[in-house]
Image (cartoon, helix red, strand yellow):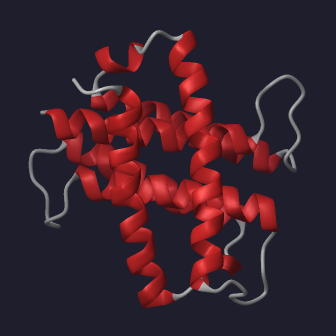
Amino acid sequence: MEGTDKKYKKIVVKCRKLFEKKLSDYGTSWRILRLTSLTDQIFIKAQRIRNLQILAKRKVDEGQDSEFIGIVNYSIISLIQIKLGIAEKPDLNTKSAIEHFDKQVIRTFELMKNKNHDYDEAWKDMRIASFTDLILQKLLRIKQIEENNGKTSVSEGIEANYQDIANYAIFALILLENK
């Protein structure tokens, strides 16, 4: 398997290209979304992946890959929203939105490298279904933190959870690509 950093960046390029295309179609309409709405959007995608992994029959011709890419992009959008705050109307141009996207990807990549070092690339031996379950667990944690008005006493905050979700989705995409 190619090096993790190289594979990770290859997946990020795919995610970024879709982000750019969506910006072209919709602009930055996502700027009005509250974090709770973004959490729910990611939850819907993760739940669909879980259903695809469990159910034999599907009625929509889209697989796990597109949903994991959506999870990455919505996680990055969530990190941008945390940084900038929620807007009343779209307030970023395409160039600025992409710059914010890239900054959050770099921060998330750095976190992955640090954790990947400490965990000795254990993700390579994991199952894609486990990443799905971990993403759902992180989303339930975020929902609880949101219910607690963003406060935690001993746990990571919302931002770290979104970063982990993005990284888990990228790892799943790497594994899917290697199948």
Q: Is residue 93 above or below residue 159?
A: below
Q: How many marks?
A: 0
**Residue visible at 79% across and 49% down in the picture:** 147
Figure quadrant of residue 71: bottom left
Figure quadrant of residue 115: top right
Position of residue 85 in the picture relative to residue 67 (left or right) = right
**Residue visible at 32% across and 37% down in the picture:** 7
Q: Is residue 130 above or below residue 32?
A: above
Q: Is residue 1 above or below residue 70?
A: above
Q: Nearer the viewer, residue 150 or 172?
A: 172
Horizontal and vertical percent position of residue 43:
49, 53
Quadrant where the N terminus sits is top left
Position of residue 155 in the picture relative to residue 6 (left or right) = right
**Residue visible at 48% across and 82% down in the picture:** 23
The answer to whether residue 30 of the structure is visible from this angle is no
Figure quadrant of residue 20: bottom left
Q: Nearer the viewer, residue 52 or 97?
A: 97
Horizontal and vertical percent position of residue 136:
49, 39
Position of residue 95 in the picture relative to residue 81 (left or right) = left
Q: Nearer the viewer, residue 39 or 72?
A: 72
The answer to whether residue 31 of the structure is visible from this angle is yes
Horizontal and vertical percent position of residue 48:
33, 53
Q: Nearer the viewer, residue 96 or 154?
A: 96
**Residue visible at 19% across and 55% down in the picture:** 63
Quadrant where the C terminus sits is top left
Horizontal and vertical percent position of residue 47:
39, 49
Position of residue 160 in the picture relative to residue 157 (left or right) = left
